[in-house]
Image (tube, rainbow, N blue to C red):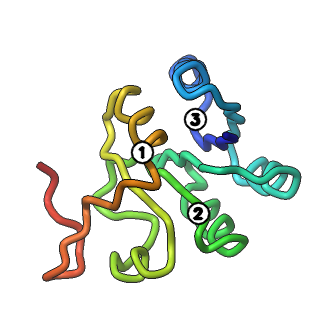
Amino acid sequence: MKILMIDHSGLQVQTRKMFIEEAIVCTVDVVLNHTDVEKFLTQESYDLIILDHSTDTCQESASYILERNPVQAILVVSSAPHCIIQRCADCLSHHNVRRLNNPTSIKNIIRMVREFTETFCNHYDEKTNTLSPSN
């Protein structure tokens, strides 16, 4: 499995990378900006992209990724009240995005990576087509 992680630089990211690679036996490439996102995605294909929603170029990178491949598997780690896709119904119908609320443990990230295809976004509220309140 190949994973692209779009995140901030620092020890925490390198620690996440190490734990994910050890727990899942995969390769994780880390990029810090949109220019690198474009560069890596033109050179490689990835089974999953982990996107930190707090990065400066999150929305630009997400748009680029979904333009290239609308069903690219993306795990968004976010403390924002909104997701990278405006409408939940559009996301569920046309994309392959899951979301974890930040802060979250590395254990939750690893679980979501392992179970990505078996899980659905749990932030969807069918009645209002908006994000449901966090538990």
Task: Give the residue pinned by disc 3.
Answer: 8
Task: Give the residue pinned by disc 1.
Answer: 115
Could you say which is closer to the camera, residue 132 or residue 46?
46
SS class, disc 3: loop
Cβ atoms at labels 2 and 1 below 8 Å apart: no
Could you say which is closer to the camera, residue 117 or residue 70?
117
Query: Mark 3, mark 2: which one is toward the viewer?
Result: 2
In this rendering, the answer to whether 88 lies above or below 62 is below
SS class, disc 1: loop
Structural crowding at the residue carrying mark 3, measured as other residues with C-alpha within 10 Å and reported as few (<14), some (14–19) or many (≥20): some
Where is residue 79 shown, x and y percent of the image?
32, 47
In this rendering, the answer to whether 134 lies above or below 25 is below
- What separation in Å lies between label 3 and label 2 (alpha carbons)? 15 Å
Q: Which mark is residue 62?
A: 2
- What separation in Å lies between label 3 and label 1 (alpha carbons)? 24 Å
Q: Which mark is residue 94?
A: none
Write down the quadrant of residue 104 in the picture. Answer: top left
